[in-house]
Amino acid sequence: MPPQTFFLVSLPTSISPADSAPEALTTLRSAVTTDYGTTYPFAIPTFKIGTLDTLVQQADDLAKLELGCKSVVDKVADSLRTLLDADEAKLAEQKVVNDRPVSTYLQSFQWNKVKYRADKPIRELLDTLSKEISAVDNDVKAKFTQYNQTKTSLAQLQRGNTGNLSQKSLTAVVDPSRVLQEADSEYLQQQLVAVPSTLTKDFLKSYESISPMVVPRSAQLLAKDDEFGLYAVTTFKKHAPEFLHKCREQRWTPRDMKFCEGGREAEAEELRKTEKLERRVWGEALRLGRTGYSDAVMAWVHVLTLRVFVETVLRYGLPLAYVCGITDPKRAKKAKAALDARFADLGGNALSRDKKGKPIKDDQAGMQEMAGMGGGDQGFEPFVFYQFEIV
């Protein structure tokens, strides 16, 4: 599922003849036809306004925080995608905001007055949102790390049951009573070696001579599968490391002689417990991912709301008389071009124009002069405009 694109647009009410917010919203809506997208009212509270220097600093801080919010949303979405094996239908069920599709949440957005009181300074709101998005990031990251570790442990146990004789657990393959244990002899020790079937003849011809002190004719075939044969070879303990090293050079795989206490039953029980743990942690990760995605998107949209407010004050001045709308574009480029054509005059002399009076997009001088106004990191716009994509 491709990212969803949205526009946040703030315009002065002076764009309408009556200089009123309802009529200005109608003017905004008429600029983007239904063929290109749909525009909805976007209500923004009136926040406490500080000095000009404070607003400029807050604009910079909000731009950085917004990038952080986007990053967290992207990471949570990616974690959910991995958890659900990229199943788009299941992903759509989980990537919701307050149990609603993202587009529905944005179209009916209301500032959360309980969590973020509008009578608090913008700096305090910014700090609160920053802490919240960091908490979401840390919680989701920790849970998905736990799930990945559990999944890896389960894969190792399953591989021990289903792999070939060079990989799988030997608990269910070798009877410990058939193998010379370390405590059984002061000088001798048996080594378990998985030999590829294609190298069996070479092994039987040469294993006695690849290192000193290998007991002649001691190789015993303990088990066999389609790819490997498992042999027990007796050596003197003193020369065991050299023998194992030579085995690896010959592409024979030494196996550890570690047997699980309790035998096959204990190993099977450990596998069952790990499978149960993996299912439980998977469910916890899914629930936390769903909640984390919702919380991260809401925090991001509240940060965007503050950005629009601050940029609106910087651009249009006081007293505040503006209208804000959110556009869900069907064709983003066409919708943006329609907005530019309709409201380019708001840029004043900051934009150069062609002979027909149309604004020239690549006016570098104007962009540098007005950097940070009306679009922040998106360059200069003739009006307050933010385009963002939510995965």
Image: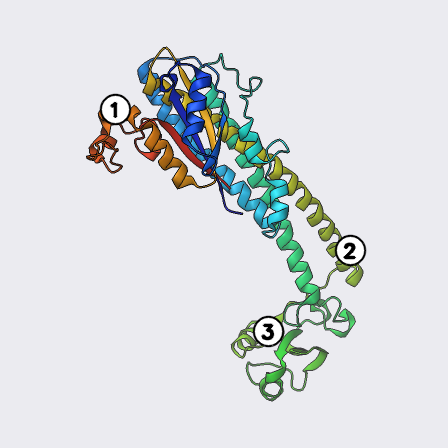
Marks 3 and 2 sit apart, C-alpha to C-alpha, by: 27 Å
Q: Which mark is residue 253?
A: 3
Q: Nearer the viewer, mark 1 or mark 2?
A: 1
User: Which is more toward the observer, 376 or 79?
Assistant: 376
Tags 3 and 2 touching, CB below 8 Å:
no
Q: Which mark is residue 348?
A: 1
User: Which is more toward the observer, 283 or 354?
Assistant: 354
Marks 1 and 3 sit apart, C-alpha to C-alpha, by: 77 Å
Earlier residue among tags 1 and 2: 2
Mark 2 element type? helix
Marks 1 and 2 sit apart, C-alpha to C-alpha, by: 75 Å
User: Which is more toward the observer, 205 or 14?
Assistant: 14
Q: Nearer the viewer, mark 1 or mark 3?
A: 1
Q: Amino acid at mark 3?
A: Thr
Earlier residue among tags 1 and 3: 3
Counting from the top left corner in percent of width and height, residue 158 is at 68, 61
Earlier residue among tags 3 and 2: 3
Q: Amino acid at mark 1?
A: Gly
Q: Amino acid at mark 2?
A: Glu
User: Which residue is rendered at x = 73% and y = 70% of the image?
Assistant: 184
Residue under numbered circle 2 = 269
